[in-house]
Amino acid sequence: MQTNAILAGLAVVLAIPTVTTICSEDQNFTEYDDVPRLFDGFTPDNVQAVSLQKRSSDEEEPAAVPDPANPAAEQGNAETLVLLRSGDGWVIGDGDLAGVPVRENKVQDDVLKHVREFRRDERALVKAGAADDELTERGLTEETGTLVRCFNAEQQPLAEFIVGADASGGEWGQDKVKGFFVRRAPQQKDIVLYEPNPPYWNLTLKPEDWIETRIQQFDSDKVVSFAVRNPKGAVSFKRPAPDGAPPSEEGAPLTRDWAAETTPEDRGAVRQQEVTGLLSRFAYVNVQRYVGHVQRLRDPQLAQSVPGPNRSQFEVTATLDDGSSFTMWVGEKVADKNEYYARFSGPDEQTKNYLVAVGDWIVTGFEKNPDNSLFDPAATTPPAPEGGDGEGEGAAAEAPAGGSGENG
């Protein structure tokens, strides 16, 4: 009994410093949501448009402030990139490439995530109410920094800020601060230090750095018909479901064998691996670049280079079991480049509106004569011996198997 009382007393004594330590740590620890933010309550899902603007280095007059009611409006001589949220993701919002898809999560990772993480606490605040020369020194004016604006569906700004100079001066080292100076625009002049994690942030305004170059992707195993036309010929194949079942019938997988709709003269069986390999090349295509919207091309020569139905050197089409189809038209070779002008059509009809350039390695596989490359030679029957008759042919055929008296 006395032992139990002693142990209970020790437990109480030991508990006092433990509770004190926990309370002390709790007071020193701040929850993520409790940290003061530069844009409290900012919700990335509410952003429907993003405008990035940077004044050109040779511009003499200050750039105009973007119109909140029209984020895609022309902004003087400043370099401007507008991004819009569409039903399928983000797209370029202005210029010749308006409507071109942006890489998945690019806007989230390079803009929205950072806006939500901007701190405004004692640790992040560099200078409250900075003077104009201090803002200029840290690249935080509209003439020296990058102005970023996020709009909601009603074109109202949800966040406006300027990204200034790299706090490290572009140098690396343990004694260098890895972060960027940021200030809320347009009225506030407080300078905060933003330290992204990981410590990289390349806020580029070049559309080509944002564009999704994968223009086409589908499951080649679901293709029911495949056709190729090039300057050397044309051929088409079908891959039916077993036992004649409709390809769309649930539980009826496609056969692995291709059948030619028309077999070229003097050719034999379909080369299955060659057809499958060519289809795989077509099922995933990245473009080198988007040249522009076919209806907004300013160069008359470019406008004449737009390929399409009945106006192309190559035409490749694949139809899937759900009825969707994908087509590539390839036109002329781009002067002084290993590229071809091309157009694509698919379930997303938006892609058909753009002239693009594809690498010549994409076209190479479709340059061969389809009759020779996709079919075996036709089987041939050995000619009959001269001067023989039916009996002689039969005797000659039987001689190797049965032998002769002389050899026996």
Image (spheres, helix red, strand yellow):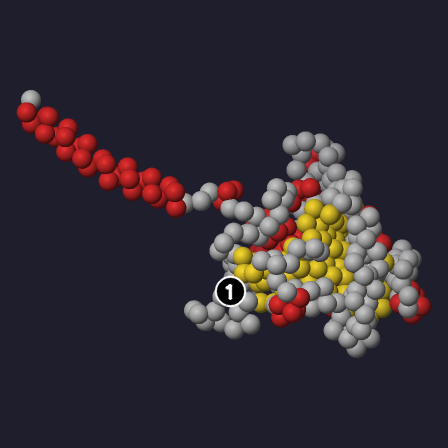
Left/right placement of residue 193 relative to residue 289 reads: left
The quadrant of the image that shows the N terminus is top left
Q: Residue 124 at x, y = what percent?
A: 52, 56
Q: Does residue 341 lie above or below 70 as drawn?
A: below
Q: What residue would you read off at disc 1?
A: 178
Q: Is residue 358 left or right of residue 117?
A: right
Q: Which residue lies furthest to the left in this view?
A: 2
Outermost residue to the bottom: 336
Q: What residue appears at the point 75 percent right and 67 percent down from the top-left corner?
A: 55
Please give the count of numbered marks on the rendered protein: 1
Where is residue 149 drawn, in percent x and y? 71, 53
When the figure is inspected, residue 391 is found, relative to residue 407, above or below; the finding is above
Is residue 238 visible in the rendered image? The answer is: no
In this view, 48 is above or below 171: above
Q: Which of 338 and 292 is in front in this view?
A: 292
Q: Which residue is drawn at 39% across and 46% down?
A: 28
At 71% across and 56% down in the image, what residue appears?
186
Compared across the picture, whether 106 is left or right of 152 comes to left
Q: Is mark 1 on a helix, strand or loop?
A: loop
Tell me if residue 10 comes above or below residue 100 in the rendering.
above
Any part of residue 28 in sight? yes
Residue at 76 percent of width and 42 percent of height = 153
Dot 1 amino acid type:
Lys
Residue 85: image location, x then y, percent:
74, 47
The image quadrant that residue 404 belongs to is bottom right
Image quadrant in which you'd find residue 244: top right
Q: Where is residue 303? Give x, y as percent.
A: 91, 64
Mark 1 nearby-residue class (10 Å; few <14, some 14–19, many ≥20): many
117 to the left or right of 279: left
